[in-house]
């Protein structure tokens, strides 16, 4: 007890109240009293555990980050579990932030080594799987402490199930749900320290909102992302076995005990649910059927927590409601969330594929297999497959149609290719010939058929609505086509579809619900169903468990999807021609632009230009990349769906990609109605994707155009008022001059009259009637004097004149004389042109 007092005295904070300091001094003077006397004399509200928590809270405000971490390491090493138990919930929340997102904690999602190297290295060392924080977790785990976690912060399907008094499907929640006591705030889970820590760690990815300045932070460089990778490598090892937890005792490492919780027989994930009320009456003492399974309980818990917190946001009922176009989802994952899930999927493939060939074979399911080997076989199909499918379906249907979808796409493609993460994967070779997908992966393709086929249909529907001229969108189409064009993959998918479409002869009604259904007793993996060798049964079980008994399956190689692929091929061909046309226009405009265009000498485009793609931002390089991506994507699609060159040529002509005799693009596809041209659905698609466009010209009053960037705003307004006053004052005289039939009349008409609106091309008949009412009389316009280029040209003229000793007045007279001669010539040419037209 004396040692404990001395340690507490060393941790005395400066910000404590006087009565707390007095208590410290008093306790150090009474070191010889026995514990019973001290407990009787001590103040109840200043017991050591609460004082330690208050001390650490005070230090978190007054001390720098590095000093706080050093102090925490010393506390974890020196204090017993009884005192550490009180600070554990506060410490976890101070690191990962509060569940409501108000407290940011250490902000691990924005902490980067290159920006804050000291804080980064300290945080990573403290939270490492073998670091001080995990030592604290194992220290508390050995004493079987429990911590309350509110149900209200769980994913929506889990929260709804528990609130309806139905036990969730995942065994992670078994024997943990606690009904609220009298006066309690609500349902909560009783979690052991490891579960409590992992719940907070996983949920911080969702509950903590990054600050506005974190939008440009690279996710893979952040402390959170790297910690996820370290935890996966530690608890789901691809080589060897799971390392035992480190013990802080001098005796060396000792295995951490498995959580001692009563077990509830729970026969399946979806067959029938157990009432929570019934569970509280009928739960019984656990019987450890397989004591060796305790060595991987942390691995099971880690995977279950990650899957539940990151993927289980959509239930089958929610998914069916999502098919409605009016359905709205409350949860939408972020791009960072998707990248972390992709990291999990890649590691799970490597973890599952680390089995030796003799262990991975179906005959290896025997009592001799270790729990870790059994867990490797079950990790993806048992815990990940269904929730990932629903997660991907939601992303494909609700993600914005922009380049950020690339994160979702790469997550999907990573899951589709487990062979990329197998130990025997082929090293990158110099030849361009893709390696054939081994028949070893046929069971995986068949048992994940919907992830290949239905999500491919979802990608097609997105690709048909995006601008394929954009290099980023073209790259996504190329990536998908390249993956599905891997030799033998399309054949395996087609065989899987044939197995599913086989008539059900011997499979009883709804027997598919019993597939992949373990019986959980002591451990998550303590009871396994017998191996099922019927390939057709496996495929049907997969489809029915995800889509329901009454699902309508659309074959990937059937006529419906083939028609969509042909349409995509049309649009790819059209996008290639559009990219080439835009590239030619970009080259011509760049070559014709003079050196001083930035000063305003280059004529401005008053009619605007098409901003529908990012070619202008990236230049010629992007055009080359777009062409390459689309060319290869078209080639891969032809390989997968066996499209011929004749089909492509015919469809290209049907789409209307030919050019007119002038070499210019035709107008968007339209029909002529009573009020003019009406766009067809194809015409709207062509405009949205920049494939065709109307030549839009300004048809209004030139004096009332918006002020341009090359004009002086205040000067333009002053000149407009001046010219308007002149026009009102001399309107009659100007009209009389312009009505004369001699040369003076022609000269005045050239300067005072705008080109007739009847001479302009109006694309809508409605505008012609309106234009007739907008006929304007002669007027003077001085707006040209408000342009930077006009003023700069005048300054240059006066500067050049000064070099030849010509004064400003004489220079101005020469400029006026020159303009008069130019105007006389233009008047004669204009009149001559009108005579030829007559």
Image (cartoon, helix red, strand yellow):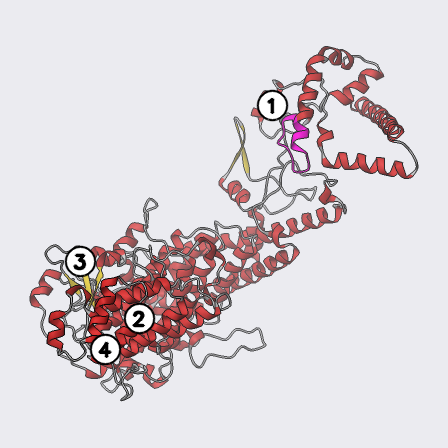
Asked if residue 510 shows in the view, the reply is yes
Task: State if disc 1 and disc 3 touch (CB < 8 Å).
Answer: no
Task: Please check the rendered image and state whether residue 218 is part of the magenta-colored stretch, yes or no.
Answer: no
Q: Earlier in the sequence, mark 2 or mark 4?
A: 4
Quadrant position of the N terminus in the picture: bottom left
Q: Earlier in the sequence, mark 3 or mark 1?
A: 3
Q: CA distance from mark 1 to mark 2?
A: 69 Å
Asked if residue 505 shows in the view, the reply is no
Q: Nearer the viewer, residue 212 or 420?
A: 212
The x, y position of residue 280, in whole percent, is: 9, 64
Q: Earlier in the sequence, mark 2 or mark 3?
A: 3
Which residue is the site of mark 3? Answer: 187
Q: Residues within 10 Å of mark 2 (few under 14, many from 20)?
A: many
Q: CA distance from mark 1 to mark 4?
A: 95 Å
Which residue is the site of mark 4? Answer: 4
In the image, residue 624 above or below residue 776: below
Q: Earlier in the sequence, mark 1 or mark 4?
A: 4
Left or right: 343 in relation to 42: right
Q: Residue at x 50, y 75 (%)?
A: 435
Stretch in magenta: 702-717
Which residue is the site of mark 2? Answer: 303
Which residue is the site of mark 1? Answer: 768
Q: Splitting the image into 4 quarters, where does residue 263 fall?
A: bottom left
Left or right: 5 in relation to 286: right
Q: Nearer the viewer, mark 1 or mark 4?
A: 4
Q: CA distance from mark 3 to mark 4?
A: 37 Å
């Amino acid at each position: 007890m004396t040692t404990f007092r001395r340690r507490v005295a060393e941790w005395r904070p400066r910000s404590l109240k006087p009565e707390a300091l007095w208590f410290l001094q008093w306790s150090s003077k009474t070191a010889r009293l026995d514990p019973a006397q001290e407990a009787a004399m001590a103040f109840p509200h200043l017991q050591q555990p609460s004082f330690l928590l208050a001390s650490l809270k005070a230090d978190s405000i007054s001390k720098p980050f590095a000093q706080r971490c050093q102090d925490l390491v010393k506390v974890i090493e020196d204090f017993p579990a009884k005192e550490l138990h009180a600070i554990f919930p506060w410490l976890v929340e101070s690191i990962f932030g509060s569940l409501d997102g108000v407290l940011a904690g250490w902000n691990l999602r924005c902490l980067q080594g290159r920006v804050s190297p000291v804080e980064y290295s300290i945080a990573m060392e403290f939270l490492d799987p073998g670091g001080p924080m995990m030592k604290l977790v194992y220290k508390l785990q050995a004493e079987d402490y429990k911590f309350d976690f509110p149900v209200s912060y769980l994913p929506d399907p889990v929260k709804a199930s528990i609130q309806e008094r139905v036990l969730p499907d995942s065994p992670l929640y078994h024997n943990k749900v606690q009904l609220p006591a009298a006066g309690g705030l609500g349902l909560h889970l009783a979690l052991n320290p490891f579960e409590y820590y992992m719940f907070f760690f996983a949920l911080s990815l969702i509950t903590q909102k990054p600050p506005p300045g974190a939008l440009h932070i690279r996710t893979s460089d952040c402390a959170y992302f790297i910690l996820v990778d370290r935890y996966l490598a530690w608890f789901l090892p691809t080589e060897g076995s799971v390392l035992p937890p480190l013990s802080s005792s001098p005796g060396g490492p000792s295995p951490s005990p498995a959580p001692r919780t009563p077990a509830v027989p729970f026969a399946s994930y979806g067959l029938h649910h157990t009432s929570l009320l019934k569970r509280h009456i009928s739960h019984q003492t656990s019987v450890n059927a397989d004591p060796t399974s305790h060595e991987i309980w942390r691995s099971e818990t880690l995977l279950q927590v990650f899957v539940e917190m990151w993927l289980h946001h959509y239930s089958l009922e929610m998914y069916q409601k999502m098919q409605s176009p009016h359905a709205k989802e409350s949860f939408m994952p972020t791009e960072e969330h998707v990248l972390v899930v992709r990291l999990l999927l890649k590691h799970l493939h490597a973890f599952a594929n680390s089995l030796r060939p003799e262990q991975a074979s179906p005959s290896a399911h025997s009592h001799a297999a270790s729990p870790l080997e059994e867990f490797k076989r079950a990790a993806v199909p048992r815990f990940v497959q269904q929730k990932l499918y629903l997660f991907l379906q939601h992303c494909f249907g609700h993600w914005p149609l922009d380049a950020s979808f690339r994160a979702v796409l790469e997550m999907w493609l990573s899951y589709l290719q487990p062979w990329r993460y197998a130990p025997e994967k082929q090293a990158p070779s110099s030849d361009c010939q893709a390696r054939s997908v081994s028949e070893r992966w046929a069971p995986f393709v068949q048992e994940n058929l919907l992830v290949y086929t239905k999500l491919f249909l979802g990608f097609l529907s997105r690709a048909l609505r995006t601008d394929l001229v954009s290099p980023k969108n073209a790259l996504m189409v190329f990536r998908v086509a390249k993956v599905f064009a891997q030799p033998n993959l399309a054949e395996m998918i087609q065989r899987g579809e044939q197995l599913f479409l086989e008539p059900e002869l011997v499979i009883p009604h709804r027997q598919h619900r019993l597939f992949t259904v373990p019986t959980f007793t002591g451990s998550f993996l303590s009871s396994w169903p017998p191996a099922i060798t019927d390939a057709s049964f496996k495929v049907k079980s997969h489809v029915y468990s995800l889509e329901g008994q009454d699902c309508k399956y659309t074959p990937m190689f059937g006529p419906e999807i083939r028609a969509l692929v042909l349409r995509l091929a049309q649009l790819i061909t059209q996008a290639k021609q559009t990219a080439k046309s835009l590239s030619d226009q970009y080259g011509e405009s760049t070559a014709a632009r003079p050196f001083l265009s930035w000063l305003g000498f280059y004529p401005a485009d008053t009619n605007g230009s098409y901003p529908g793609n990012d070619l202008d931002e990236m230049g010629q390089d992007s055009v080359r990349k777009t062409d390459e991506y689309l060319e290869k994507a078209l080639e891969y699609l032809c390989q997968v769906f066996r499209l011929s060159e004749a089909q492509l040529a015919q469809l290209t002509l049907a789409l209307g990609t030919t050019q007119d005799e002038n070499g210019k693009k035709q107008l968007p596809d339209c029909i002529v109605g009573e009020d003019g041209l009406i766009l067809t659905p194809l015409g709207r698609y062509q405009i949205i994707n920049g494939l065709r466009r109307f030549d839009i010209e300004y048809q209004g009053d030139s004096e009332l155009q918006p002020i341009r960037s090359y004009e002086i705003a205040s000067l333009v307004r002053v000149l407009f008022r001046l010219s308007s006053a002149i026009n009102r004052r001399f309107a009659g005289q100007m009209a009389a001059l312009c009505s004369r039939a001699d040369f003076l009349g022609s000269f005045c008409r050239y300067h005072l009259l705008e080109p007739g609106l009847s001479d302009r091309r109006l694309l809508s008949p409605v505008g012609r009637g309106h234009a007739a009412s907008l006929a304007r009389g002669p007027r003077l316009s001085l707006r040209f004097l408000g342009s930077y280029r006009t003023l700069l040209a005048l300054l240059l003229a006066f500067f050049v004149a000064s070099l030849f000793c010509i004064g400003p007045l004489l220079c101005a007279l020469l400029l006026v004389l020159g303009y008069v001669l130019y105007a006389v010539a233009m008047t004669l040419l204009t009149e001559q042109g009108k005579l030829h037209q007559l």
